Amino acid sequence: MTNNDILKKLRVALMLRDDQIVEILELVDFRISKSELGAFFRAEDHPNYMECGDQVLRNFLNGLVIHLRGTKENPKNPNDVLAKHKSEIPKKETSKERAEFKATPKDSEKYRGDQSSPKSGSAAGKPKKKAFPKGNGKPVVVEKV
């Protein structure tokens, strides 16, 4: 595993944003910009990919200890810090707002394949299909076997 992989996995596991990582690095007086940090998270074949050095990872880990545990004079509970990170994550859109992608149908009994529906086809509100295509009104028989 490279230093970049370790940094990526810690970022995901601790639910950290780029600006939070910059703040953690500033706790140990290590200055880095968001764009430099973004270069560490790119794919290896990307032209702006940059290898994460030992010094950056070492400072990040030391800053992470201070960020999670606090200092000797001002200790913190790491679980409280992680819960705070989790609460800051924006909520995703729910399926209620996007009804066309709803996972379960409104009338689940209607769509069951193992039971016959008590409703008839015309009473269910389905539009009637035309029996024959436009033209002479006779069905076209391709081949009898």
Image (cartoon, grey):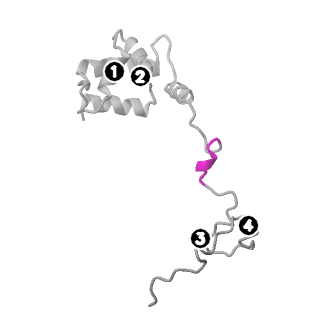
Q: What residue type is labelled 2?
A: Asp
Sequence-first disc among 2 and 3: 2
**Dot 3, crowdedness within 10 Å: few (<14), some or many (≥20)?**
few
Name the secondary structure under disc 3. Answer: loop
Q: Which amino acid does label 3 sit on?
A: Lys
- Classify residue 4 as left or right of residue 16: left
What whole-number distance in Å separates the C-alpha atoms at marks 1 and 2?
Answer: 7 Å
Q: What stretch is highlighted in magenta?
A: 97-103
Q: Name the residue under label 2.
A: 18
Name the outermost residue toward the front: 136
Name the secondary structure under disc 4. Answer: loop
Sequence-first disc among 4 and 3: 4
What whole-number distance in Å separates the C-alpha atoms at marks 1 and 4?
Answer: 58 Å
> x%, y% of residue 92?
56, 36
The structure residue drawn at horizontal position 44% and vertical position 26%, both measured from the top left corner, is 16
> x%, y% of residue 52?
26, 24
Q: Mark 3 points at which residue?
A: 134
Point out the image quarter for the C terminus.
bottom left
What whole-number distance in Å separates the C-alpha atoms at marks 4 and 3?
Answer: 26 Å
**Dot 2, crowdedness within 10 Å: few (<14), some or many (≥20)?**
some
Q: Nearer the viewer, mark 4 or mark 3?
A: 3
Identify the mark at residue 64; answer none if there is no mark: none
**Dot 4, crowdedness within 10 Å: few (<14), some or many (≥20)?**
few
> x%, y% of residue 102?
61, 51
Verify CB contact (< 8 Å) between mark 1 and mark 4.
no
Sequence-first disc among 2 and 4: 2
Is 29 above or below relative to 113?
Answer: above
Q: Mark 4 points at which residue?
A: 124
Verify CB contact (< 8 Å) between mark 2 and mark 4.
no
Q: Which amino acid does label 4 sit on?
A: Ala
Q: Which of marks 2 and 3 is in front?
A: 3
